Image (tube, grey):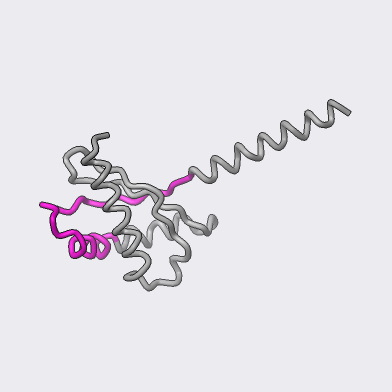
Amino acid sequence: MSVRLDKVASLVKEEISLIFLHKIQDPSLGLITITSVKVSPDLKNAKVYISIYNKEKRDELLQKVNDIKGFIKSQLAQRIKNFRFIPDLAFYIDDTLDYVEKMDGLFKEIHKNDNKNNE
């Protein structure tokens, strides 16, 4: 990834985080964290990865975020004035923490079995 794409992705991530923090006043969304943003080389599309604390309602909350993505894009356009155009946003669930928890559980299981074998 080029330096320019990294800078744009970082700026978009920061501004979307601030939009969620200050402009979106929907308590039903709960705790949402913007984990990363990947911008296409032509800067027209951005994949926004979000982490949702409430695991049971992830799909429902992702749908709510997608329903307000027009509002988020308009707020982003107001905040970032030096872009020729604002990228189209696509939101995705970041399941990295789930993977880490699963791997951690597997490692604990292996160590538990090792301790039983050593006794």
- Does residue 59 sit above or below 43 in this rendering? below
Does the magenta portion include 93? yes
Question: Toward the viewer: 81 or 20?
Answer: 81
Question: Toward the viewer: 3 or 52?
Answer: 3
Q: Position of residue 69 (x, y in %)?
A: 28, 60
User: Taking 114 as reference, is 6 left or right?
Assistant: left
User: Taking 43 as reference, is 110 left or right?
Assistant: right
Q: What residue is rendered at 54% in x and 40% in y?
A: 99
Q: Residue furthest top?
A: 117
Does the magenta portion include 58? no
Count the labels in the image.
0
Q: What residue is rendered at 13% in x and 55% in y?
A: 82
Q: What residue is rendered at 20% in x and 37% in y?
A: 41
User: Taking 51 as reference, is 13 left or right?
Assistant: left
Which region of the structure is painted magenta?
69-95
Question: Toward the viewer: 72 or 6?
Answer: 6
User: Taking 55 as reference, is 105 left or right?
Assistant: right
- Does residue 111 sit above or below 75 in this rendering? above
- The quarter of the picture where the C terminus appears is top right
Q: What residue is rendered at 66% in x and 35% in y?
A: 106
Question: Toward the viewer: 81 or 108?
Answer: 81
Q: Residue furthest left?
A: 84
- Does residue 119 sit above or below 5 in this rendering? above
- Does residue 17 sit above or below 88 in this rendering? below
- The quarter of the picture where the N terminus appears is top left
Q: Position of residue 47 (x, y in %)?
A: 31, 46
Q: Residue furthest right?
A: 119
Occupied quadrant, residue 80: bottom left
